[in-house]
Amino acid sequence: GQSLEQPSEVTAVEGAIVQINCTYQTSGFYGLSWYQQHDGGAPTFLSYNALDGLEETGRFSSFLSRSDSYGYLLLQELQMKDSASYFCAWMDSSYKLIFGSGTRLLVRP
Amino acid sequence: DAGITQSPRHKVTETGTPVTLRCHQTENHRYMYWYRQDPGHGLRLIHYSYGVKDTDKGEVSDGYSVSRSKTEDFLLTLESATSSQTSVYFCAISDPGVGETQYFGPGTRLLVL
């Protein structure tokens, strides 16, 4: 079958670094995306990895290892506003996104 | 922000009633999607469209139909609403070749009593 696994909840301290992991079992894998969603809001695109390695966008970085079927989102210098849910999603061969069930990040002062 | 709106934003309806949700975009994006989001689940794809009159089913399409007669509008219809269709519905848009970057509408909260 096809699945995406990510932790349901992560807690971290303001100013710290947190890593949210995502493992997948899929066929026709084209890449891994990450989305952020604040409570009551719409998902917003953060990053996409089509190739192995690290992609950096400001305080956020995303990593992909196709050989390990594994990726992660790294958030640095955590701020209170980073408290949100984070979803990994893989893109299949029909350009559809299949989302994981999300990781709720709580940033504490 | 991508110009994408959804209407209505909130709706309460009764079981067995037909319901239509509208997604409207001003970005001229070719691809449009309908998702539902429930507690404990990520976003699950209901239907999607790759162009006018070109639609296909997603993973949770039972009980839903869609239509796309214009590039800018994508309608989702619940033919006969059931309580299991109580959910938050999101519309999204993207362009060919960058399907991993989807822009989402604000969502519609639907309660079926």
Image (cartoon, coloured by chain):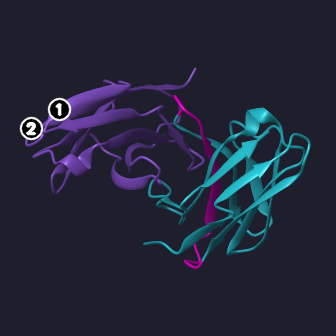
Residue A38 percent coordinates (x, y): 38, 49
Residue B87 percent coordinates (x, y): 65, 41
| Chain B rendering hue | cyan
Residue A29 percent coordinates (x, y): 47, 37
Q: In the rendered structure, are the residues bearing label 2 and label 1 in contact, judged by CB atoms less than 8 Å apart?
A: yes
Check disc 2: other Cα within 10 Å, few if <14, some if 14-19, many if 20+. Answer: few
Write down the residue under mark 2.
Answer: A16
Residue at horizontal 35 percent and vertical 34 percent from the top: A104
Whether residue A89 is in magenta: the answer is no
| Element on which disc 2 rests | loop
Q: Nearer the viewer, residue A51 or B79?
A: B79
Residue furthest to the top = A1
| Chain of residue at mark 2 | A
Residue B106 sits in which quadrant? Answer: bottom right
Q: Start and end of the magenta stretch?
A: B26-41
Left or right of B53 in this view: A49: left
Instruction: Say which mark, if any, is on residue B53.
Output: none
Q: Nearer the viewer, residue B52 or A101?
A: A101
Whether residue B40 is in magenta: the answer is yes
Write down the residue under mark 1.
Answer: A12
| Chain of residue at mark 1 | A
Check disc 1: other Cα within 10 Å, few if <14, some if 14-19, many if 20+. Answer: some
| Chain A rendering hue | purple
